[in-house]
Image (cartoon, helix red, strand yellow):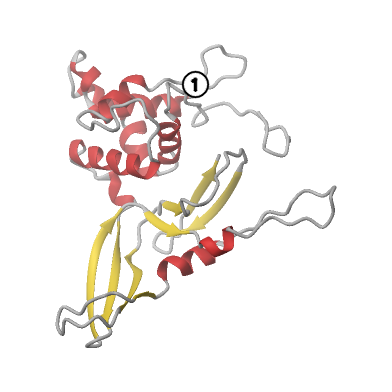
C-alpha cells in the first residue's frame, strides 16, 4: 500500500487495527465504522460490552437484531483476531450488518454508493432507537444556534437545532485557484484551504438579499449567522465542497489531535 506520492505505508496489525473488506460499493460503510471506532462511548457500548447484547437475544434472533450485529462488528474490529501478520483471515465482511442497519430504508438497502454523512445519521438513529441506556450518541450530539436579523425591522430571531455532524463549507474561491509551478520539472503546487477559512465561511454573517420581512412584508433582506450553542465531547466534521469542483481519490495518512474544552481529553481525527 502506498500514498499518492509513491511512498510505501507500513502495514499494522493487532486490536483496533482490523480492516474492512469491500462487499460492493461499501466504502462509505467502512469509513463510517472506522471513524466510530475512535469514539470511546460507541466502543464501550458495542465493543467492550458486546456480550450483554448476545446474552439478551435468542441465538436465532441475533441474526436479525441490530444491537447484536453492531456488537459483532465492533468486537471483531477491536479483538485483533482478524488482524494478524501473515494470516489468511485478515479483515471482516459486514454483510449482515449492512442488511440489518439499512432495513426499511430503500436507498441504503440498495447496492449503490452512498453519502457518508447520511449514513452516519442513519446509524445514529438506529442506535438511539435500539440502545435504551446508555445513550452513546450523546457523546457527539450538540446544538446549533441560528441568528436571523430582519433588516426591515432590525428584529432578531433565534432558533436551535440538534445535530450530530458539523457541516463546514469549503470556500469555493480558494479551492478554485489553479495549481502553479515555478518550472516545467517541478511538481504543481496545490492550492490549500485552511481550517480557519472553512470556519469563517460557515459561521460568518450571510446576507440574504431576497428575504421578505414577515412583519412589514418588505423585501429588504436579512442577515443570518450560525454558532455552536452546546459543544459535544467528540465533534464529527463534514467538509462540504462545491459540486463544480473536480474530486480525485487520493491516499494519505495523517493524524491530528484536538482537545475537548469540557473533559480535557484528546480527540483524534484520522484520515485514511
Query: Residue 166, can we see it?
Result: yes
Q: Residue furthest left?
A: 215
Residue 19 position (above or below residue 123): above
Residue at the spot of label 1: 91
Report helix, strand or loop for mark 1. Answer: loop
Picture quadrant of residue 3: top right
Position of 219 compared to 188: left or right? left
Count of numbered marks: 1
Closer to us: 98 or 183:
183
Category of crowding for the residue at label 1, using alpha-carbon neighbours closer than 10 angstroms: few (below 14), some (14–19), many (at least 20): many
In the figure, 137 relative to 73: above or below? below
Percent across and percent down for residue 49 are 31, 32
Which of the 4 image quadrants contains residue 39? top left
| Quadrant where the image shows the N terminus | top right
Residue under the point 35% across and 25% down: 111
The spot of residue 255 in percent (x, y) is 58, 47
- Residue 44 percent coordinates (x, y): 35, 38
The foreground one among 36 and 7 is 7
Q: Is residue 169 above or below residue 145?
A: above
Residue 14 x/y as whole percent: 54, 26
Name the quarter where the C terminus is drawn: top right
**Residue located 54% across and 53% down the image:** 257
Residue at 42% across, 35% down: 28
Residue 13's quadrant in the figure?
top right
Q: Is residue 52 something one can see in this rendering?
A: no
Q: Which residue is at 19% across, 35% downward? A: 130
Residue 6 appears left or right of 110? right
Horizontal arrangement in the rendering, residue 137 relative to residue 38 (left or right): left
Amino acid at each position: 500500500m502506498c500514498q499518492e506520492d509513491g511512498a510505501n505505508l507500513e502495514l499494522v496489525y493487532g486490536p483496533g487495527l482490523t480492516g474492512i473488506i469491500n462487499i460492493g460499493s461499501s466504502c462509505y460503510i467502512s469509513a463510517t465504522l472506522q471513524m466510530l471506532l475512535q469514539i470511546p462511548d460507541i466502543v464501550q457500548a458495542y465493543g467492550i460490552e458486546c456480550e450483554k447484547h448476545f446474552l439478551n437475544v435468542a441465538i436465532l434472533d441475533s441474526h436479525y437484531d441490530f444491537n447484536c450485529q453492531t456488537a459483532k462488528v465492533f468486537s471483531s474490529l477491536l479483538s485483533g483476531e482478524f488482524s494478524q501478520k501473515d494470516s489468511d483471515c485478515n479483515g471482516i465482511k459486514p454483510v449482515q450488518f449492512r442488511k440489518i442497519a439499512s432495513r426499511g430504508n430503500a436507498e441504503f438497502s440498495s447496492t449503490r454508493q452512498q453519502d457518508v454523512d447520511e449514513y452516519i445519521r442513519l446509524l445514529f438513529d438506529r442506535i438511539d432507537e435500539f440502545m435504551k441506556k446508555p445513550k452513546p450518541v450523546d457523546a457527539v450530539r450538540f446544538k446549533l444556534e441560528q441568528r436571523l436579523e430582519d433588516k426591515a425591522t432590525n428584529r432578531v430571531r433565534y432558533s436551535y437545532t440538534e445535530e450530530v455532524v458539523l457541516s463546514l463549507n469549503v470556500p469555493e474561491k480558494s479551492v478554485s485557484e489553479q495549481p502553479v509551478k515555478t518550472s516545467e520539472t517541478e511538481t504543481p503546487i496545490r492550492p490549500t484551504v485552511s481550517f480557519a477559512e472553512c470556519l469563517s465561511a460557515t459561521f460568518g454573517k450571510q446576507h440574504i438579499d431576497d428575504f421578505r420581512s414577515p412583519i412589514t412584508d418588505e423585501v429588504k433582506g436579512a442577515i443570518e449567522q450560525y454558532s455552536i450553542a452546546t459543544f459535544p465531547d467528540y465533534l464529527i466534521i463534514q467538509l462540504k465542497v462545491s459540486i463544480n469542483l473536480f474530486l480525485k481519490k487520493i491516499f494519505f495518512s495523517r493524524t491530528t489531535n484536538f482537545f475537548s474544552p469540557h473533559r480535557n481529553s484528546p480527540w483524534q481525527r484520522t484520515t485514511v
